[in-house]
Image (cartoon, coloured by chain):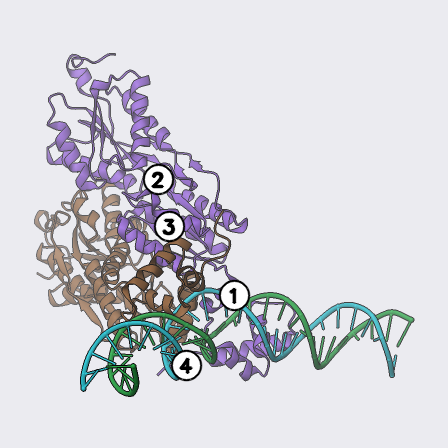
Chain colours: A purple, B brown, C cyan, D green
DNA sequence: TTGATTTATTGGAACGTTCCATTTATAGGC
DNA sequence: GCCTATAAATGGAACGTTCCAATAAATCAA
């Protein structure tokens, strides 16, 4: 069915009547080979159906051209965008990145990382899974393989990070809500084992503080970072004695969930309860009502991460500067003004 | 910064006071090694920070444990699901699949395939990019590397295919619309260079024919398989003299686009114009109105594809049976009955 | 022509593993 | 104790490439 054994450069050499070294040179595009010899070899390569054995080559060369991309949740379009951005720049550098999914599972991540290392990757771009232990990258660091974190970071790690300005994004979003007259605010979704969570929550808190929303008028509801999580966050919030009138959600998925739950209760997102998302996935624009969200340009961050990686490989270093990407609030229809502040006396304990 | 040179089994051997062969045996989990020797070696492995060089190993073993997964559009959650399904089964087989994205670009696909082959993959699961030339997989076939197509197929290729029953899915969907009283039907989106397109369109046509919708009451609008495509399809359709009252869309993205365009015109999807999607992505359920769609169980198909691949590798064959996955129509809210058939005399040319 | 230069080509030794054929150690039977 | 059978450990060759040093061929200056 298939050709007996895999063809090697020796087979090509025999076919073309040259030495293996010459074939190797042709394969590497060395200019020192006579054009006619080159084409003779090229033809032989075609004829024998040769496929280059990069494993064997790397044995000598000691630096491969493969880069691993480890992503915690491929089904989240947000991360898929990140991957696409990276691919764009690697492609133009003649590198094929291999993507692997960890499904937010640290054990799986360990396997994936190990496998990638064994494959001899030149570098690793990682969006670490939730619950990644601090030591998970020690081996890789001591092996001298450059790593950059994308979107997420690990607490106290020296690995460079490419991420959006979560603090500022959350600040902008919360300020927007407060500007619309809301005085009882909630933060929905996410959990405290994620550094991002603290960053976003921090921005939210800072906005509340500087813009005069008292700490006791803030409701924090942790939850899954999915639609389901958003639904249950909203349920919890509305069950309170004095429920919030607006929520900043950890990400868009949570926001969609919250809006869904509002509808189920006969409330209109935007008019009856303001919702802001985070990430600004494509879907946000097309939702009903269109979701106000913090845009982070994930594809751009992906590109950035790829560039940083390329530079690290080139200068054979394992260190690089962090890069915090700009964010901006995209205002759409999901957050109108607080109704209640108009219809009834300001809630007890409200300041302004 | 990092340890000088990469550690090899020789370093481990020296450290543990055994021979390289013994180390190799331990690495492969051979039972013929005395337990205490094993643990001595294990310790040395830890100490020197060894990382296994799979490339070198494959040089001798001649069959790797890596499988490539080539996907045409990672940003489509549908394909991401497929990937996730595959990963599930490969994981339990101790295999780490590498995913690569072709972004629907045949040239890129060529590069990706080449790179994967050079890496010495044991097998390839591919959802071919649109416009893939028939010869694109010849090299791979002659190299004897097993390939299976997932979701999409190439015209006249002997490569096994794992795909949903597109014909039946489209038939069911069209029949549903006709059952609701619609007599002027459209098929939105997709283009004829995709085999899937013909399958779905075929099912649609067959339903129309057997259930009494005349060919002249059918409108086919080709278009991009995205929201944008859906929007323009709807525009075209409503610009007709006698516009359709319902549409089966090539996929859910197109359906979302169509619904969006309806809203923009002040029409209510479902009530004023019926829309059915295809693929049943998670989003379909949460849309407003919830989208009636043909569920194809992409994760399940991914699992199936992975199993077939595993079996092919195991039995060192390059052939396998096709597998057509069951589909079912999930009825939600996006297609009410045809209003017009009630409010005005049956349109000219309508049969029943 | 001849020797010096440059340009093309080549053989051999590595790279880090596996696997086979041996050797060495351990245990068993008498 | 000795011989045999089994278990444990080992050295060497191979896998397909690259790279260096060396050779062979072509070009040039005199």
* Residue placed most toward the observer, A137 or B328: A137
Q: Quadrant of residue B26?
A: bottom left
Please, is residue A227 above or below residue B13 in the view? above
Where residue A305 appears, as percent x and y from the top left, is: 44, 45
Q: Are marks 2 and 4 on the same chain?
A: yes
Where residue B346 appears, as percent x and y from the top left, is: 11, 54
| Pointer 2 with pointer 4, Cβ within 8 A | no
> Looking at the image, is mark 3 or mark 4 earlier in the sequence?
4
**What residue is disc 1 on?**
A60
Secondary element type, mark 4: loop
Residue at horizontal 11%, vertical 32%? Answer: A266
* Residue placed most toward the observer, B208 or B169: B169
Q: Badge 1 local density, few (<14 within 10 Å), some, or many (20+)?
A: few
Instruction: Give the left or right position of residue A36, taking residue A109 as reference.
Output: right
Q: Chain of mark 2?
A: A
Question: Label 2 to label 4, Cα distance in Å?
Answer: 47 Å
| Pointer 2 with pointer 1, Cβ within 8 A | no
**What residue is disc 4 on?**
A5
The numbered dot on residue A154 is 2
Secondary element type, mark 2: loop
Where residue A277 appears, as percent x and y from the top left, is: 27, 34
Mark 3 or 2: in front is 2
Question: Label 2 to label 1, Cα distance in Å?
Answer: 35 Å
> Looking at the image, is mark 1 or mark 4 earlier in the sequence?
4
Question: Label 3 to label 4, Cα distance in Å?
Answer: 37 Å
Where residue A112 appears, as percent x and y from the top left, is: 32, 55
Q: Are marks 3 and 1 on the same chain?
A: yes
């Amino acid at each position: 069915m298939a050709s007996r054994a895999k063809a090697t450069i020796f087979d090509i050499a025999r076919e073309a009547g040259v030495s293996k070294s010459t074939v190797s040179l042709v394969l590497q595009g060395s200019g020192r080979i006579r054009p006619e010899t080159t084409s003779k070899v090229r033809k032989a390569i075609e004829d024998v159906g040769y496929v280059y054995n990069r494993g064997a080559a790397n044995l000598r060369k000691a630096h491969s051209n493969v880069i691993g991309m480890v992503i915690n949740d491929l089904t989240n379009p947000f991360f898929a965008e990140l991957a696409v951005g990276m691919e764009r720049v690697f492609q133009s550098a003649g590198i094929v990145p291999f993507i692997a999914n960890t499904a937010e599972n640290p054990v799986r991540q360990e396997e994936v990382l190990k496998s990638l290392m064994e494959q001899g990757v030149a570098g690793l771009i990682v969006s670490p899974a939730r619950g990644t232990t601090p030591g998970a990258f020690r081996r890789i660091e001591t092996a001298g393989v450059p790593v950059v974190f994308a979107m997420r970071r690990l607490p106290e790690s020296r690995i460079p990070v490419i991420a959006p300005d979560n603090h500022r994004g959350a600040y902008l979003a919360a300020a927007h809500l407060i500007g619309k007259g809301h005085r009882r605010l909630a933060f929905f979704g996410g959990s405290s084992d994620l550094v991002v969570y603290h960053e976003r929550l921090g921005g939210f808190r800072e906005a509340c503080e500087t813009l005069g929303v008292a700490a006791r008028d803030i409701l924090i509801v942790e939850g899954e970072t999915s639609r389901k999580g958003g639904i249950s966050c909203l349920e919890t919030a509305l069950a309170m004695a004095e429920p919030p009138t607006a929520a900043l959600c950890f990400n868009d998925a949570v926001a969609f969930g919250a809006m869904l739950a509002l509808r189920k209760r006969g409330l209109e997102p935007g008019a009856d309860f303001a919702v802001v998302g985070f990430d600004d996935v494509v879907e946000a624009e097309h939702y009903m009502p269109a979701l106000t969200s913090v845009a982070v340009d994930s594809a751009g961050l992906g590109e950035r991460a790829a560039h940083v990686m390329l530079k690290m490989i080139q200068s054979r270093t394992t260190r690089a500067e962090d890069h915090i990407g700009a964010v901006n609030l995209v205002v759409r229809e999901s957050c109108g003004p607080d109704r209640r502040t108009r219809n009834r006396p300001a809630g007890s304990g409200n300041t302004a």
